[in-house]
Image: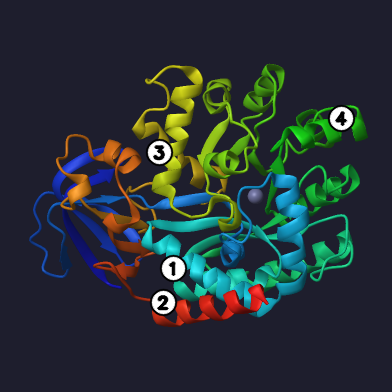
Amino acid sequence: MGKLAIKAKFIYYNNKLHQDKYLLVNNNIIEGITETLSDKTYEILERGNSGVFPAFINSHTHLPMSYFRGLADDLPLKNWLEEHIWPAESKMLDEHFVYDATILAAAEMIRSGTICANDMYFFSKNIGRALSDVGLRGVVGGGVLDFPTKFAKNSDDYLKRIEDLIEEFKSDELIKISVCPHAPYTVSPENYRKCIDFSIRHKIQIHTHLAETKWEVDEIIKRYGKSPVKLFDEIGLLDANTIFAHVIWIDDEEIEILGSKKANIAACVKSNLKLASGFIKANKLKEAGANLTIATDGNASNNSLNMFEEMSYFAKLQKGLNLDPTVMNAEEVFNMATKNAAKALNLDKCGELKKGNYADFMIISFDDINMLPVYNPVSHLVYTAEPSNVTDVFVNGKCLMKNREFVTIDIKEVKEKAKYWNKKIRS
Ligand SMILES: [Zn+2]
């Protein structure tokens, strides 16, 4: 790695835009920025009319579902899950599937400037392996359900698998582990309590779905006499180290509760729109004090891991819902996709370009046709940019994409594997 100086038109450093400077990197750490550089020990990367920005952290996804992209579209969540996704998973899932599908997802993430995923799935050891092999960061979650799957027999068995994960990745600097009770309609309060104890004992985060559909809220009220948010509050999840995905079907009182607990929330706007699950009241949640982050959800429901598109949908939905174009400005939304996510996932020294942080960043071309002319680069990231504008991606000082070419992934092999599994899934 050594010492590297990146010269670019724009550098988003200390949460501020700087022009015509060098970003200085020493091995895996950011040293600072400078206008002139006389130190000859730096290798110089000249990127002209480009911008260096913190790269995206996708705060809720199911990476191996990338092999189910487009398998079942135009259906509501419940039918989609019960009639298509779960049967396909019960037939297909194994370590090889999960590894190969995660490499496809990793290639898609690198290509679109994402350097970390907060994942929830099964056979997670190979998700962690795949991410680590290509050099991406990950918070790799082991799923927990009340019922048996190919992965585990019961709640204790699921938790045992997560203990194995913790052991497996304890010295991997890119991979963290989390415990992922799936949702209030698939995991009992008793098992949620076990997950909280487990997360405290192992000092890891809890990652769960919450209030994704109206059906879920009705079902939980029927079962327990209270809404999912109130049930979670009673169980202690809102006071635990937790990140909640979706959080759509909530009332004003619940917004206040989630805000007062500074809840970490992963908004999955595009997946929610496609499944017609509903609309997150992100602006109200933010004003109440919640920590908002941006996520794609899995490729089976999105159907992409493109964080540029996700930011754009997110910002526009909030403007539309509030009938106010000034809410959720570009800078705020970009911070949600980077800095807020690092905070939500307890990723120290990540999510921001500043002295002492890890050298995680993307370089964006402002010379491409869709990016011209340039008035406000950050606004371009949210409303204009697309994955093809990403030229370079660095994680922990290591280059994963150079001049739009993958460095750590054999893309020909990724394509062949995708075709091979596509055939198997079809049959
Ligand atoms: Zn999800």
Mark 1 lies on residue: 107
Give the mark nearest the N terminus, 2 or 3.
Answer: 3
Mark 2–mark 3 distance (CA, rounded to whole Å):
28 Å
Mark 2–mark 1 distance (CA, rounded to whole Å):
7 Å
Q: Position of residue 12 (x, y in %)?
A: 27, 44
Q: Nearer the viewer, mark 4 or mark 2?
A: 4
Instruction: Say what secondary structure mark 2 lies in.
Output: loop
Tell me the kind of residue under disc 2.
Ile
Q: Would you call the spot at circle 4 few (<14 residues within 10 Å), some (14-19), or many (20 or more)?
A: some
Horizontally, residue 272 falls left or right of residue 251, namely: left
Mark 4–mark 3 distance (CA, rounded to whole Å):
34 Å
Q: Please give the name of the residue rendered at 74% of the width and 32% of the height, measured from the top-left corner.
A: 214
Give the mark nearest the N terminus, 3 or 1.
Answer: 1
Mark 3 lies on residue: 312
Q: Would you call the spot at circle 1 few (<14 residues within 10 Å), some (14-19), or many (20 or more)?
A: many
Q: Nearer the viewer, residue 83 or 62?
A: 83
Q: Quadrant of residue 147?
A: bottom right
Q: Please give the name of the residue rendered at 49% of the width and 57% of the height, measured from the top-left corner.
A: 116
Q: How is the image coloured?
A: rainbow
Q: Nearer the viewer, residue 268 or 136?
A: 268
